[in-house]
Image (cartoon, coloured by chain):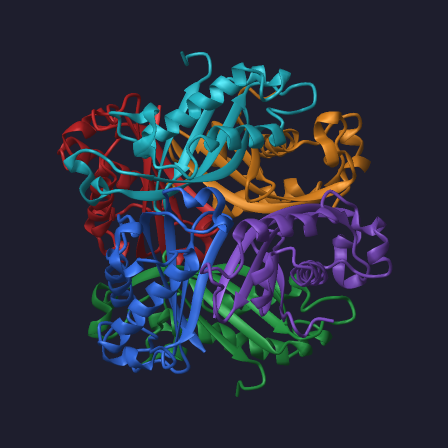
Chain colours: A cyan, B red, C blue, D orange, E purple, F green
Amino acid sequence: MYSVSVRDHMMIAHSLKGDVFGPAQRLHGATYVVDVEFRRRALDADGLVVDIGRASDTLRQVLADLNYRNLDELPAFAGKNTTTEVLARVVFDGLVSALRGGELGPTASGVEQVRVTLRESHVASASFDGQVDDTP
Amino acid sequence: MYSVSVRDHMMIAHSLKGDVFGPAQRLHGATYVVDVEFRRRALDADGLVVDIGRASDTLRQVLADLNYRNLDELPAFAGKNTTTEVLARVVFDGLVSALRGGELGPTASGVEQVRVTLRESHVASASFDGQVDDTP
Amino acid sequence: MYSVSVRDHMMIAHSLKGDVFGPAQRLHGATYVVDVEFRRRALDADGLVVDIGRASDTLRQVLADLNYRNLDELPAFAGKNTTTEVLARVVFDGLVSALRGGELGPTASGVEQVRVTLRESHVASASFDGQVDDTP
Amino acid sequence: MYSVSVRDHMMIAHSLKGDVFGPAQRLHGATYVVDVEFRRRALDADGLVVDIGRASDTLRQVLADLNYRNLDELPAFAGKNTTTEVLARVVFDGLVSALRGGELGPTASGVEQVRVTLRESHVASASFDGQVDDTP
Amino acid sequence: MYSVSVRDHMMIAHSLKGDVFGPAQRLHGATYVVDVEFRRRALDADGLVVDIGRASDTLRQVLADLNYRNLDELPAFAGKNTTTEVLARVVFDGLVSALRGGELGPTASGVEQVRVTLRESHVASASFDGQVDDTP
Amino acid sequence: MYSVSVRDHMMIAHSLKGDVFGPAQRLHGATYVVDVEFRRRALDADGLVVDIGRASDTLRQVLADLNYRNLDELPAFAGKNTTTEVLARVVFDGLVSALRGGELGPTASGVEQVRVTLRESHVASASFDGQVDDTP
């Protein structure tokens, strides 16, 4: 299996509901350094998994909906906890949608799996790793 | 698959038996920066793989038995080589035991896989990655 | 000159006032990975700049006033921009106060300089570096 | 599954053919920080996946054919694009060949999978991950 | 002293003249991860050393002249060795010129010192650190 | 001021004397990732601070006396605490001695300052930074 990974980041505010979150129930924030890995079994005719430039641009666009936002105010997250795990899945879904929409170029249709990792500090991170075909 | 990772470290002394180890047959030591990844297919009702706070506390407790020790003197390792690979498995087993004992909270029973990585320098590391259910 | 450095982190929400800040004028947040370097010309009788354990504990206490907070709501920052630079100075002042209060131990009075660096992402950081004696 | 990872680097010049590469069609270069992960289900009698020293030496030898070279001038790459993905596979093939040739020692025959990651900057990398047995 | 740091990278080909360079006398290449630190004693009215966005944009422009180039073909370097040290100085000079030209904004005139670090691998880097006023 | 930095590591066992060290009074160990920065105002005729290859070789030789050792058994440290600060100074002294002995090459006599940093974990480090001329 081949893979290509790109990195970007976003800075958001949010609060989390539930005793398990302790002080994180208060409105606070996070920088998420976001690593995305695209995987496929065979390379395209140019020798690529995806064009790194287009992958980086697409990641930036997917993050733009969240970046510099208070997630507590976004309708998409009403009634949901925006844990790092949940946000990893949101970024994954955005990237799969972009892949299907052709935003990563015509040969990117060969991408089979995507892994999204959000690093919230030097000691903690969360990720979602899935098959493109299994995603609704 | 979702995952959450936490990091801690331990500092130990030991020696290794066998010509293959060269100068590492002498009593020396290591800092292991320890990364643990917990994985499961579906999140719990709070949107979590595991509570990061509890995961960090549990990791610290598992490492406490080894931290600031000369492993050559611990009965558990008598007649065994405490290679980085072997120690990764020891930490894995300790975490699986803690998962089963409920130390990571009631919903952590959904964790299916655990990966433990010990980084011994900026250029070398070892890991053990296993199914919780396959562990005796 | 000898130095010792310790690392911790905090997660905060805030907004910034002024056109120069663009989208960061909206309420958002950040993880700051905080590195503190203590410097002195001669070591104490134990061979230390500061006790790393006490230094880590003190750093955690200084950050506790800010961690998991919306800085826009803290009276201490009323009318001020909580830029990364400003926050580095706030942490510096807290550490100098702790040094003078003896919280880092009796021999820590030999510390001459402190540098505080706040890393807000994988590509940006800010710091304040000052003489302990020059601080009001 | 157990794994051991080692790191080295190489510095090469090359150019890439195809509009998708934009300015990278010009002769330029890269440092690739190379991480290799060797994986197997059971450790050898010494408690090892592979001898880290031999693994590091073998990686250096495999990279030596490419290091400090203009890849555009190497016959092995005539008519091919030396993308990061392609180079990850070249390093993988070299390591599998070394494993089969016994260069990593007699017990290294137990290695089942190898992953090679080439980090070309702080924001981009590519890898190839394969079964030793599936490699021609 | 306050500081702000930003990071970017460039990918170049070059060769070095002189027996001391060994195999690096051949045409090869490098990725330089570039860290720039801007320093000043007092912050501007917004609480900034420099606007991080403008600093990042300026750094990208300074690197654009070198990025994806074979430095051996650039007239600016005719008869000179483009060592990492020399390139750190070139980037420093470009940034000082941009500071004086007002490209980092009106208040950036308060910047007193700039440090440019080029990381060429995980084990080696070079830097130039100078006073803005001392630069011709 | 120009600088060049190189990195290597060593793995040692030791114990520390004094109540301040808590559990580190027991025999334990550490990996020290060692960064050395050489600084001078003007480059040599080749455009170098020091030859990175020779600097790396010299660092390896200086660390060889300590690597894979129990420091408690070395006569050089009898009656002394081998804190990270003290070891940073030991490595500094070894490098200054090598500089004076010509081991880094004839033009390395222009090096004015050396900084040695020992990273003992992902959260703690110590360093010694000194003038070559001030060292006995």
Looking at the picture, tell me which residue is in the foreground, A122 or B58.
A122
Q: Nearer the viewer, residue D3 or F44?
A: F44
Q: Is residue E69 above or below residue A16?
A: below
Quarter of the image with the N terminus of chain F in it: bottom right
- Let me know if residue F120 appears in the view: no
Residue at 77 percent of width and 41 percent of height: D70
Residue drawn 75% across the image and 49% down it = E65
Q: Position of residue F24 (x, y in %)?
A: 25, 65
Q: Is residue D79 above or below residue C118?
A: above
Asked if one can make out residue E50 in the rendered structure from this viewpoint, the answer is yes
Nearest the camera: D100 or B40?
A: B40
Q: Position of residue A46 (x, y in %)?
A: 70, 23
Residue F17 screen position, x and y as percent: 25, 74
| Residue depicted at 82% across the width and 57% down the height | E77
Number of marks in picture: 0
Where, by quadrant of the figure, is residue E101 drawn? Answer: bottom right
In the image: residue B45, left or right of residue C43? left
Residue E28: percent from left, percent from top: 75, 47
Residue A18 or F61: which is nearer the viewer?
A18
